[in-house]
Image (cartoon, rainbow, N blue to C red):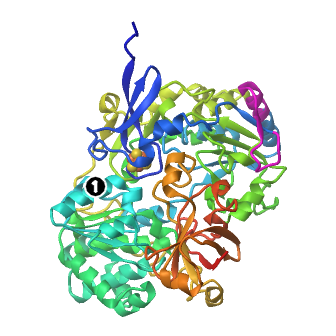
Amino acid sequence: MNAAPDIRVVHAACPHDCPDTCAMRVTVENGRAVRVQGDPEHPTTNGALCTKVSRYPERTYHPERVLTPLKRVGPKGRGEFVAVSWDEALDTIAARLTAIAARDPEAILPYSYAGTMGLVQGESMAARFFHQLGASRLDRTICASAGSEALLATYGIKAGMHVEHFAESRLILIWGSNSITSNLHFWTIAQAAKRQGAKLVCIDPRRTETAEKCHEHLALRPGSDGALALALMHELIAHDWLDHDYLERYVDGWPALRERALQWPAERAAAVCGLTVEQIRGLARDYGTTKPAAIRLNYGMQRVHGGGSAVRLIALLPCLTGAWRHRAGGLLLSASGWFAGRRDDAWLQRPDLLAGRQPRTINMSTIGDDLLREASPAFGPRIEAVVVYNSNPVAVAPESRKVVAGFAREDLFTVVLEHFLTDTADHADFVLPATTQLEHWDAHTAYGHTYALLNKPAIEPVGQARSNAAIFRALAERMGFDDPCFADDDETLARRAFLADRVDLDSLERRGWARLDVAEAPFANGFPTPSGKAIVDVPGLGVPDHVPNNECAETTPELAARFPLAMISPPARHFLNSTFVNVKSLRAVEGEPLLEIHPDDAAARGIADGAEVRVFNERGEYRCAAAVSTRARPGVVVGLGVWWRKLGRDGTNVNELTHQRLTDIGRAPSFYDCLVEVAAA
Ligand code: SF4
């Protein structure tokens, strides 16, 4: 008689770079994960995962997963490796890093981002390791730092509304967010509000799946969001749709902002934004007269030169109307600030191991330039080694030609911790097999809701995979790092990540998640700034204004004449940055790399739907298929990303065209501030 199967359900958390940070339940049958589902009890997950992550077992047991340490045997970039033992890999890596560190530890660079958002497999043991080493520090700017720093400068905290309260809003502006693709659980809440009579307005250059389902869509030009916010303020002032009492009590610098907004009548903004005056006035009327009104801002709109200033302006809108007084009014860009002071960052990352050293900081968004830089007094030593984890810079960093040239340097020692042979792993000297979320411990904060989560391992590591923390622990041991913190195991790191007096650890243990104690209407009575008020005139930044793109007819007319189309590169629906591109069932839905182009722009260039096109500018060229569609507004093309280069038509992706110039605030890349021309191939 067959034995009954051993079936268990384990609490887990989605590790991906998505505001929803879903609570998951993993069903394990005889030691194998067979199903991943949304936790029906978790209030924002509400029992549902997105299509991408519901295929997590497919990704975990993917036949192409890296399951042993690999050593390079071919030219860099070709992805030719042989399997080696953990001992050989770790001994060699430790010896190389030790030799480089003996000359100058700043020649070693960690490179990581949000491949996992976990506190343990992100920056815990890794941070301890690089702090002890005295390696260069990494400025982690590639996604969100323009908006994050703008929010911090304005509100004193990177935080906003509870996402659940959007269900009670009467007007929701979905600004710079394709929520159906990248914030699905917010979209479910917005749908509930819609059923109760709320109006949904989407503000996005692209007619996204989300825009199609809103009552209105304002397809503004990329990089014009700040001008739109100023014109909305102008209308609010002109019609006195202001909450004077709120402005008086809780906004520092209102007269200066008023003066700035009065310079932006709807006519001026309409010309900048590519909208009609009526569209702007109609939106202002809705926003000024509907209560409660809420804004779901997302990070796409801040990936332009003036992205930080635009976020500051939009963040001030609910201060004019006093929308913050109601729990269903205000704005949500990030909730991550609510977790500060609730997790033990100093213990997790141990910056004290630097022991007074102040290593230089390298901006991850300029990795293309920096890998190619020679040693100099200003820069410091040439980068001799890069350790990449939770990131795929060869695919996702801007201006790929330089990034690829940098990672192809024969004298660069590159170690990549990965699940798959990505474009970056193909350039590694050693690839180390990392565990997936189903195989390791972790603890999670979120940036789209206010629940802490605990991820327990559901299955044993697949193949010889080890967790990131275990890999850095093993390297620390070989390199003679003897602080007791290098002995902390993953479970200890996960269980101690949150502070016991600030997070309900019992709930974390029992349910896998715990709600933070955050006020219902957090800014109804002011902001956590020294004055208790939102700040308009930020020291060093001044009063915010619209900042035009680096590349546009206004600032670079000669360039705009040669490359007249503005390109944005938002994620394709079934990918999450460059993650999931190799999951065949998801790639099959996406088809192939596409460039959406408006029928008028296509006709002017003799481009038919489905035809192969060359997308090019001074930095490079990218070939893909044209999707002639009104999803793109005239003058704007949409290169859906982020495809792995090696899966593209010509071994490149959209980042062949993007540049490394940074945003006005936050030192972030301006991916969506990019002029191109398109031609039939
Ligand atoms: S990617 Fe986002 S929506 Fe999908 S399961 Fe993860 S957190 Fe949820």
Instruction: Give the x, y percent position of residue 618.
Output: 71, 77
**Residue 244, can we see it?**
yes
Identify the residue at image location x=82%, y=38%: 99
Query: Quadrant location of residue 468?
Result: top right
Asked whether mark 1 and ligand 1 are closer than 8 Å, the reply comes as no
Question: Residue at 56% of width from left, 38% of height from top?
Answer: 350
Q: Which percent across, then down, holds residue 327?
A: 21, 59
Q: Position of residue 628 (x, y in %)?
A: 50, 75
Image quarter hosting the C terminus: bottom right
- As rendered, which of 20 and 606 lies closer to the eye? 606
Across and down, in percent, residue 645 comes to 66, 57
Magenta-colored span: 73-94
- 284 vs 68, nearest the viewer: 68
The residue beneath circle 1 is 188
The question of residue 267 being in magenta is answered with no
Most extreme residue toward the left is 196
**Secondary structure of residue under mark 1:** helix
Q: Front-most of 241 and 219?
A: 219
Is 282 left, or right, of 88 in this rendering? Answer: left
The amino acid type found where label 1 is placed reads: Thr
493 with respect to 551 (left or right): left
